[in-house]
Amino acid sequence: PHCPAGRGTLDNPGAARAVRAGAMMCPALRGCLALAAVMCAAAAAGAPGAKDTGRPQWQSLGANSGCGRSAGASAPLGVREESAQSVEECQRRCLEDAGFCKAVEFRAKGSLCRLLGEGVRAMHIAAGSECVRRLDEQYTEIYVMLPLDVISPLKTITDPTGLEHMFDSLQTVGVDGFMVDVWWRFTEPSPKAYDFAVYKDLFAMAKARGWKVQVVSSFHQCGGNAGDSCNIPLPDFVLEAKDVWYKDAAGRETMEYISLFADEVNIKGRTPLAMYRDWFDAFAAAFSEELGSVIADVMVGLGPAGELRYPSYPLSHWSFCGIGEFQAYDKHALKSLKQAAAAAGHAEDWALPPPADDVGDYNSHGHETAFFTEGFSTDFGQFFLDWYSGALKQHGARILGAAREALNGKAEISGKVAGIHWWYDYPSHPAEATAGYYNTNFRNAYAEIADVFAKEGATLDFTCLEMKNTDNAEECHSRPEYLVMQVIEAAKSKGIKFAGENALPRYDHWAYEQMAGYAEHVDAITYLRLSSVLTEAENLERFADFVEALHGAPADAAAPAAGAGAGAGADE
């Protein structure tokens, strides 16, 4: 039922085998089968999605919190009041009448325990009270990304008063915490001289509200990618290095992230890999008390925009929905390719990337290129794509391993994979290929990446959860829903956690509904992004419906709020 293209064939073993074989070359069918496989696995496990959350039984909304029905409101809930000496005693009373009690509000003054018979949607400020709610088995954590420039170049919080006000709004909704970029430039201004003080202040704000933090080790620049609203380069001592940057076929360098082919190249006494290791060691020492409590997860920066990919579609040269360009022309990349060609017995004819005339430029379409119509499936095409994607996976393993060793199990680690949904419904998957995702020729890019993450104990974080297959022009061959389901299946097949994000800011019911539809497969969703627009009354109310749905409570988000419309810019 989840695959119209294959309906009526999967009950026939021979036809099923043919469909599965075809799916390896047909992305639309592969996405359908991925969705069907996940749903079947969930049914076999006896529960929707079969997500083993391991969540705590209770969630406190923090000190001085009162339970409420809606964002910013303190409307009374179905209540029974009893006497209790502590919030723990109040919780025990709730469990004794679990059929009625969904949450408790303990008021220290008067030793009053209020047992609440309705699910808590939100909180309000109530001095001396604490609102604690029971968690549903399908509880999915939700975090909110902070603005990219929440920390200023002066290493202060950019607008502390405004941020506090927005945090107040988020707390009424009941989010689990926030995600923030910890920029390399700000935290290591000179070699091995680390400064995390401003982030200490920021994390203290989370702790005061009972929130958790997802930290991004941002070894990339801010600026040059979709949604970037700031200009934060890499540290100066890194930018001074020569010949360690990605290059395209025209020789243009990008300095938003050090080339993975230079991971082991000495730069003033240290390799980039050693720099990343040193940074993680310093971070672990600075936040030894917060790791595992306030800091729940460290997302390891693995490439441009923090994602495990090549910078194949920089906004300075690319526009949606171009296929992008291979980034395999710096001297270390060419050396690696030459060595791989010699090992394959083709030292002369496979030692260079495909000719530029064959692969097109940043804004070409797949059918306009010789490589992405025929060349990708030749012996050379398969060799090159395997080498290019293999180097990316090796880089991911190195950096994830460094983070794992430094954090030593004190906090979870994760890595982000880009949601390159354009040209997904095209046999050669050209936009994925130039980014380093080998998802054609009977290869499953995301299962291979998930295998790398599994070996390092990392969660796989993925984007574009808000998008539908019909959001973009048909000429872009975009199929985000099928892509997301392929990645979910890949994570499940390797036994790792899956987390998700929206790729673009959206405030409409339809985007929230789309993201919430994946909740049974997702351990956490991080919403992009906190802003004054999100905290406007109507948008905040709609966001509260979304949070409620993710937290497993009965949601009233089944119908759009009056005036709700699709967000602008849903073209990528």
Image (cartoon, helix red, strand yellow):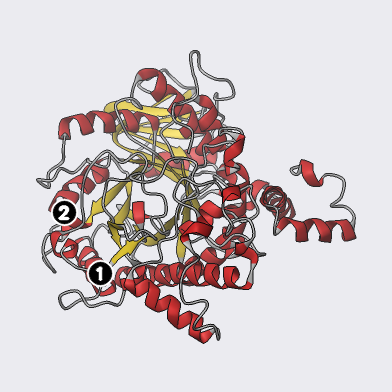
Q: Which mark is residue 173?
A: none
* Residue at numbered disc 1: 243
* Image quarter in which the N terminus is found: top right
Q: Is residue 307 visible?
A: yes
Q: CA distance from mark 1 to mark 2?
A: 24 Å
Q: Residue 466: image x %, image y %?
A: 51, 37
Residue occupying the point 51% across, 38% down: 550
First-in-chain label (1 vs 2) = 2
Looking at the picture, tell me which residue is in the foreground, 251 or 429: 251
Q: Residue 351: image x %, image y %?
A: 47, 77
Q: Residue 402: image x %, image y %?
A: 33, 72
Mark 2: few/some/many CA within 10 Å (<14, 14-19, 20+): many
Q: Is residue 54 visible?
A: no
Q: Which mark is residue 186?
A: 2
- Depicted 184 relative to depicted 546: above or below: below
Looking at the picture, tell me which residue is in the foreground, 372 or 443: 372
Secondary structure under the numbered disc 1 in the rendered image: loop
**Front tag of 1 and 2:** 1
Mark 1 residue type: Asp
Looking at the picture, tell me which residue is in the foreground, 62 or 246: 246
Q: Residue 329: image x %, image y %?
A: 37, 67
Mark 1: few/some/many CA within 10 Å (<14, 14-19, 20+): some
Outermost residue, top side: 562
Mark 2 residue type: Phe
Residue occupying the point 52% across, 41% down: 465
> Viewed as shown, does residue 529 lie left or right of 278?
right
